[in-house]
Amino acid sequence: MPIIALFSGSCCREEEVVQKIAGVTGYELVTDQDLINETSNRFHVDEGKLFSAMTRKASIFNKFTHEKERSLACLKCTLSDLLRQDNLLLIGFAGHLPPREISHAMKICLIADTRYRTGVAMDRDNLSEKDALKKIRKDDESCAMWVEYLYGKSDPWAAELYDLLIPMDKYSTDEAARLVCDNLNKDVLKATDASRKAVEDFALACGVGLKLAEEGHSTPVSVQDGNVTVTIDKHVLMLSSLEEELRRLVRTVPGVGGVETVVGPGYYQSDIYRKADFSLPTPSKVLLVDDEREFVQTLSERLEMRHIDSAVVHGGLEALDVVAEDEPEVMVLDLKMPGVDGLEVLRRVKSEHPNVEIIVLTGHGSKEMEALCMEMGAYAYLEKPVNIEVLTKKMQEAYRKLREKT
């Protein structure tokens, strides 16, 4: 029997449709949470990181950590094993992960107009119209980010992404379930030798992708008949060295036939390819907070020369937004900023995110201010102009303290 991969807009009565399909077909249901649970147990990855990888945009630190790519590589490996069986009903964001080459996987989308979905949210969740609309828009933003990440398309409900798109404002749940079940019997969805082989190629691509991600690489991987193609889609200063390293790593994965590296369109852009080095005793999530743009950009560049990558923000409120989305390991914080100043950032971050180690770096210091900052939980207090070696050492010490705690 074909595999069903069902993706839905929120408040489209997807739960009712799924239960009716399962009742008729006897298919095993696999939700995003099921996939996350299994992946977390198998690869010892935090469930929150796996959930974020599917439902949220990449964090400001991702270009250094490749955390989204590593989490998705683990999820894909778990999914690739599940796809070897029939009678499977994938529900949620994971429904977009099976490639088109697996032709016996039927991709379905349930969607409806905003008025219909708002009514469902108001009735089901006892929400006001305003709150219902807010919920739907937030859910749609997650769907759009996911589809944009996977396909480069901004419309998560685009018909070309699916084999069957069902408007739930025009179909009852019984009619929608019946439409899905009727389509399961079509010859085009029958498993063939080619589509079974595509499952194995997908599994191998997932294994290769995971190997590369674990080694700090973030590159697209495709497989056909056991032959692996790795695409270098960002500019790199030493192309031949990178190609040789990628080929060497890919050959260590069982089942790999040939290995080819190719240059993609992104290679000619200005962005530089970055390999994450997980072996260095330095923090990978560093946030620099300072409203002096030229100073903080120069500081970031000087830290990069010492193998410490950093994200930069220019205000206290922006810093708090970043921390709420993804905690940095170490924050270097200016005190005197317009709006939300450094003291308020220090107070709120240490209150709400106590594991973040904060180094205060200020040009308006005093012994009284130093004592106050240390009392509020700062790891260190430094004054501008700072010796870059002193700052680097303090950051490494702060990171070591964090690692000891966790």
Image (spheres, helix red, strand yellow):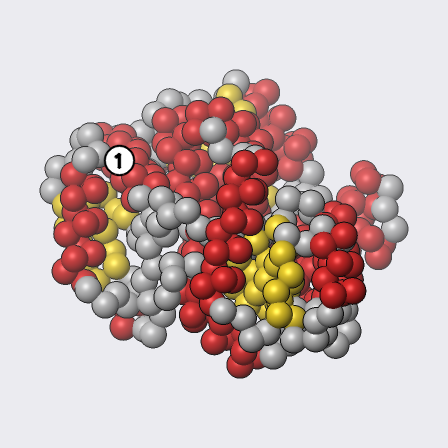
Name the spot of residue 244 as percent of width and height, x first: 14, 52
Q: Residue at x 49, y 39 (%)?
A: 94
Q: Is residue 30 above or below residue 220?
A: above
Q: Residue furthest top?
A: 26
Name the spot of residue 182 as percent of width and height, x first: 49, 32
Dot 1: element: helix
**The N terminus lies in quadrant:** top left
User: How would you rate the neighbour count of disc 1 (Cα within 10 Å): few for under 14, some for 14-19, many for 20 or more?
Assistant: many
> In this orientation, which residue lies closer to the viewer: 97 or 404?
404
- Residue 115 left/right relative to 231: right
Corner quadrant of residue 333: bottom right
* Any part of residue 270 in sight: yes
Q: Residue at x 36, y 52 (%)?
A: 276
> In this orientation, which residue lies closer to the viewer: 296 or 151?
296
Q: Is residue 110 above or below residue 36?
A: below
**The C terminus lies in quadrant:** top right
* Any part of residue 143 in sight: no
- Residue 55 left/right relative to 227: right
> In this orientation, which residue lies closer to the viewer: 367 or 386?
367
- Residue 207 left/right relative to 140: left
Q: Residue at x 59, y 62 (%)?
A: 332
- Tell me which amino acid carries mark 1: Leu
Q: Which residue is mark 1?
A: 204
- Residue 337 left/right relative to 394: right
Name the spot of residue 235 as percent of width and height, x first: 28, 68
